[in-house]
Amino acid sequence: MTRELNIIGLLGMGLILVTLGFAAMRENDRREAVALEQREEAVVMATTLYAENCVICHGSQGEGIAANPPLNSEGVREMDETTLYNTIARGRYGTIMAAFSAEEGGIFTSQQIEALMVLIQYGSWGYVAEVVDAMGLTPPEMVTIDVSEEVLTSISALPDGDALGAGLTLYADHCVACHGANLEGTAIAPALTPATRNYLDMTRIINEGVTGTLMASWDKTFTDEEVNTLITFITRWQEIQFAGIELPTIEVPTIDMSPAAIAEGQRLYSLLCTQCHGTQGYGTPLAPALNNQVFLADTPNAAIQQIIAGGVSGTAMPAWAGYLSEANIAAITAFIRSWEPNAPPIVTP
C-alpha cells in the first residue's frame, strides 16, 4: 500500500512538474510576443523620427550620404547600447552629428532615442525607405559621374596609374557635386586646379572639413590610403588633362519656373526662410542677402538647391532636405531665381 502511494505521489509530482513546465513555456512565449510587439511599435515610431530628422545625413535606407556614415552596417548594429545611445543623445565632437537628447538641448526624449536604437539594431531599412518615400522626404540623389573603363585604362597607362584611377573614382563619387566634373569649381566650392595648397593642408581640409562651408569632414569615410590617392589625383590633374583625359560634363536638370512653381516656392520661403533672409530676401544680421545680382549671377540653381538641402556647417543654415521634398527645394529655388530680373546690384543687411 505504501509503495502504491509512493508511486501515485511520484506520478502526481511529475504531473505538477510537467504542468509547470508547460506554463513556463507559455509564459516565455507570451513574453517573447510582448517583446516583439513592443519592438515593432518602437520601429514604427522611430521610422517617422528618422524620416524627419536623420534621413538627410544617413539616407533613406541607412546607407549614409557623402561624409556621413552608414547606419545599415554590422558595425553600427553590433555597437554596444551605451555607445549607441550616447552617440544619438550627445552627438559626436568634430562632426555634424548634433546632440539630439532634450537634456543636451536637442529634441528627442530618452524613449525616442531608445526607439531609434531599436530601429537601427532590428528594423528593416526597406520598410524605412518606403515610409520616407511616402512622406516625400527622400533626399535628392548626390551628383556623381560614371567613369568609363576607357578613361580608367587611359589613366592606368600613366605613372602610378592605379593610384590615379582610385583617386579619380573617389572624386567622381564624392566630390564632383561641389568642385565640378573637371575640378573647375562651382559657386559653392573652389576650383582645385592648379592645386595651390601643400599636402598637409589638403589632408587637413579633407579630414576636418571647413567650418562655414559645405566642405564636410571626411575622416570617418575615407581611409588614410584613400585620402592619399585622392590628393594624388588632384595634384596631378593637369598631367591627366595634358594626356587628353577629361571627365564627362554634369547635366543639371532644369528648374520649373512656371507661375505655380514660383507661387509654391514663395509659400515655403515665407514659412521657413524669412526669419533669417528677410521677407524680400535682402538678408538680416542672421543670414546673408539672396536678392541681389552678385549672389544670383554667381550661384547656379544646382548650388542653391544643394545649400538648401545640405545646409552650411558652422552657420545657422540648417539642412532642409530632412523636412522638404526635392520638389519643395526646387520650388524655393524657382522663387529665389524669380528675383533675378529686378534684383539690386548688391544688398548689405
Image (tube, rainbow, N blue to C red):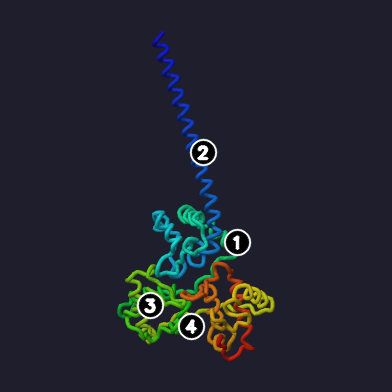
Q: Please, which residue is most extreme toward the top here? A: 1
Residue type, numbered disc 3:
Ile
Residue 87 position, x and y percent, is 42, 61
Residue 75 position, x and y percent, is 39, 58
Can residue 164 be spotted in the picture? no
Vertical placement of residue 136 versus 282, above or below: above
Indicate which disc, 3 or 1, sits on the residue closer to the N terminus.
1
Of circles 3 and 1, which is in front? 3
Dot 1 surroundings within 10 Å: few (below 14), some, or many (20 or more)?
few
Residue 205 is labelled as: 3
Dot 3 surroundings within 10 Å: few (below 14), some, or many (20 or more)?
some
Residue 81 position, x and y percent, is 41, 54
Indicate which disc, 3 or 2, sits on the residue closer to the N terminus.
2
Residue type, numbered disc 4:
Thr
Secondary structure category for the residue under label 1: helix
Dot 4 surroundings within 10 Å: few (below 14), some, or many (20 or more)?
some
Label 1, on which residue?
134
